[in-house]
Image: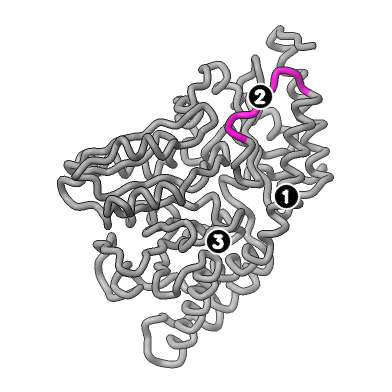
Amino acid sequence: MKPRIYFDNSATTRVDEKVLEAMIPFFRDTFGNASSIHTFGQEARAAVEDSRRAMADLLGADTREIVFTSGGTESDNAALWGAYRPGHHVITTRIEHPAILATCKALQSAGAEVTYVPVDSSGRVDPAEIAASITDQTKLISVMHANNETGVIQPIEEIAALAHDHGIVFHTDAVQSAGKITVNVRALGVDLLSMSGHKIHGPKGIGVLYVRKGTKLTPFMTGGSHERKRRAGTENVPAIVGLGAAARLALDRLPEMTTRVAGLRDRLERQIRERIPGVRTNGTVESRLPNIANLSFEGLEGEAMVIAMDLEGIAISTGSACASGSLEPSHVLIAMGLRPEVVQGSLRFSLAYHNTEQEVESVLSTLTRVTERLRRLSGRVYA
């Protein structure tokens, strides 16, 4: 059997062997509760704080600003609900992850006024649109750092500065960008930032919320005094250790992500457009993550292509895994103004550190063959 190829790393990544090795002892040997004062507990506490330092190093933060959560969705919820107060106005964008959009809808049900700012045809948010939406009641702005479907990077520094000029708390969802490009909370100027372990070769079920010192945040989960009283619940020590190991690997691999992995992505994208007619790139190529390419194939249906490629042992996607199974077209591509037929034929290819040149060539040859077959079956011929 041919080895399977995984090009859906924006949905999740495989756990790195070094991460797994770091975690195993904390299931079997060092299993203490990190809040216990005996030796078992203090060994676990030391491991948690070591991982907190690794996360702080990855994000350019202070260790006291790192809060461990169950993942990106909890971090997003904790940020928005924690910063919101009754009667506040919230600003976000139309291309956010469902974890933000669904939470904003819940905030609206709780009495918030929410403005959903549009993006341009390249998938970028115009800070002027944010500025025009600010009112005297605006107390929270949330704009993702990089989009999970297109990889387009947003002008976070400019928007954060704009927010602070008006005394507004600023949050960014950096689940896709952290570990792929340099994410420094000081340089970005953010008050709150979300990230998730399973996007950087760590385990699922663990994430981080960065909370800038001095930012007022009501605890999203209450109970014990864990995480400096900011997130109650016994710490998931093995997952936290895994996240710390993944953060160290991600920091070490950043140069290779922006060179080798970006080169693989560029070669894949370029060769697809050269070999297959009727293909367009969605989103700007000037400012995007190094591992994502979103392409539309004229006259084809994205889900049919995903299934056909899967039968060939290759995993790709039509967009966000959190929207998988939905009959609705991509809200991101719709917000960019793409025609419905273009959105319907869109595919996301997302690479990671472990992908190789041989895999890129295999995907290219298989995709070319699959595309020709599906177009032939549909009666469409492209020169």
What residue is shown with label 1? 261
Q: What mark, if any, has residue 172 been given in the picture? A: none
Q: Which residue is drawn at the image coordinates 55% and 40% (left, top)?
A: 152
Q: Quadrant of residue 21?
A: bottom right
Disc 1 residue type (three-letter): Val
Q: Quadrant of residue 14?
A: bottom right
In the image, is residue 280 part of the stretch drawn in magenta? yes
Q: Provide residue 164's location: percent of width, then percent of height.
A: 33, 54
The Cα atoms of the two marked residues, 2 and 3, are separated by 34 Å
Q: What mark, if any, has residue 203 been given in the picture? A: 3
**Element at label 1:** helix
Of tags 2 and 3, which is closer to the observer? 2
Q: Provide residue 70's location: percent of width, then percent of height.
A: 42, 60
In the image, is residue 234 part of the stretch drawn in magenta? no
Left or right, 221 with reference to 294: left
Q: Closer to the camera, 139 or 335? A: 139
Disc 3 residue type (three-letter): Pro
- Dot 1 or dot 3: first in sequence order is 3
The Cα atoms of the two marked residues, 1 and 2, are separated by 21 Å
Residue bounds of the magenta highlight: 276-284
- Dot 1 or dot 2: first in sequence order is 1
Disc 2 residue type (three-letter): Arg
Q: Closer to the camera, 291 or 371? A: 291
Q: Provide residue 171's location: percent of width, then percent of height.
A: 38, 53
| Quarter of the figure with the N terminus | top right
What residue is shown with label 2? 280
Magenta segment, prevailing SS (helix, strand or loop): loop
